[in-house]
Amino acid sequence: MRVFFCFLAAMAAFGQPLAFDAASVKPNKLDDRIVTIDVGPGGRFAARGYTLKLLIQQAYEVKGFQILGGPGWLDTDRYDVEARGRANATRHEVNQMLQKLLADRFALKLRPVQKEMQGFELEVAGDQSKLTVSKATEEAATMRRDAKGALVADGFSMPAFAKVVGAYVSKPVVDRTGLPGLYDFRIRWTERADQLSDSEPGGISLMTALRDQLGLKLVSKRVTADLLRIDSASKATAD
């Protein structure tokens, strides 16, 4: 899955990226440390107390470890953003609008790069996985939390799931399962996601949950990660 590469390619190909109809960006000077975000229906976007780095993560659907470079204030200066796009915009399209807003208001310029770094390979543990072949299509794939806190996936490919796991462990995860097609599965762990071993009596780490519940495992490896490098950015001033 190279989602943000697709975003950048689409922007370059069409020349006229999606844009909000109206938008406000203001520095947040409050010291309340409140951080909220709302990507609602009807092309709405609102973020309070968000840093530029967090806004980039939202716009390009990446995690912090995937962003390289940038000015020192990238993680410290906070902003309040309110914007509105066309009424039938999807969440994906709202994120594309946010990309345009960041380019306009922060003079943000970035580019996709690849870098070898420490991460994980997702592999089958043992002879076979414990996954169920899905009848869903990739376009209809969903992932949600159930009432017990388990992650429930319908119609997920292994490359897509590797990306999800990478988001939880904050490191790149590459699919090496060799499993084609789409799968339905449920996985639940109780330890912190980036804590890969059981620490509490009766605790279940993500590593243990992958092995016991899905028949998969994470193997620590140097992998090639898809990243975004910031070439330039400027502080946004109040509207």
Image: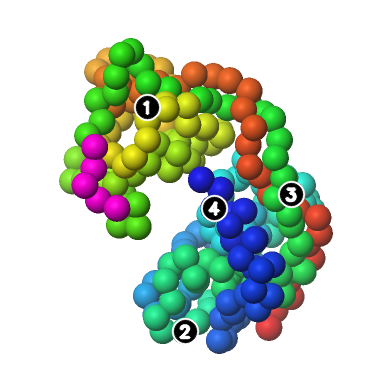
**Which comes before the other along the chain, label 3 or label 2?**
2
Check whether the beta carbons of the residues at disc 3 and disc 2 lie within 8 A of each other: no
Q: Which residue is mark 3?
A: 229
Q: Mark 3 Cα within 10 Å, few/some/many (few <14, many 20+)?
A: some
Tag 1 residue? 206
Disc 3 marks which amino acid? Arg
Q: Disc 4 to disc 2, how far (Cα)? A: 22 Å
Distance (Cα) linking label 3 and label 4: 15 Å
Looking at the image, residue 15 lies above or below residue 125: below
Gap in angstroms between the C-alphas marked 3 and 1? 29 Å
Quadrant showing the C terminus:
bottom right
Q: Nearer the viewer, mark 3 or mark 4?
A: 4
Characterize the local packing of mark 2: few (<14), some (14-19) or many (20 or more) Cα atoms within 10 angstroms.
some
The amino acid marked with disc number 1 is Leu
Q: CA distance from mark 3 to mark 2?
A: 30 Å
Q: Is residue 231 magenta?
A: no
Number of the front mark, 3 or 1: 3
Tell me the residue at 28%/39% (across/down): 183
Residue identified by numbered label 2? 86
Picture coordinates of residue 32, whole percent (x, y): 54, 60
* Identity of the residue drawn at 25% across and 51% down: 136
- Front position among marks 1 and 2: 2
Q: Residue at x 58, y 27 (%)?
A: 119
Res. 54 in view: no
Q: Which residues are magenta?
A: 133-137
- In terms of sequence position, does the residue under pointer 3 or pointer 4 come before the other? 4
Under circle 4, the secondary element is helix
| Residue 136 inside the magenta-drawn segment | yes
Q: Secondary structure at mark 1?
A: helix
What is the distance, in whole Å, between disc 1 and disc 4 at their CAs?
24 Å
Q: Which residue is mark 4?
A: 3
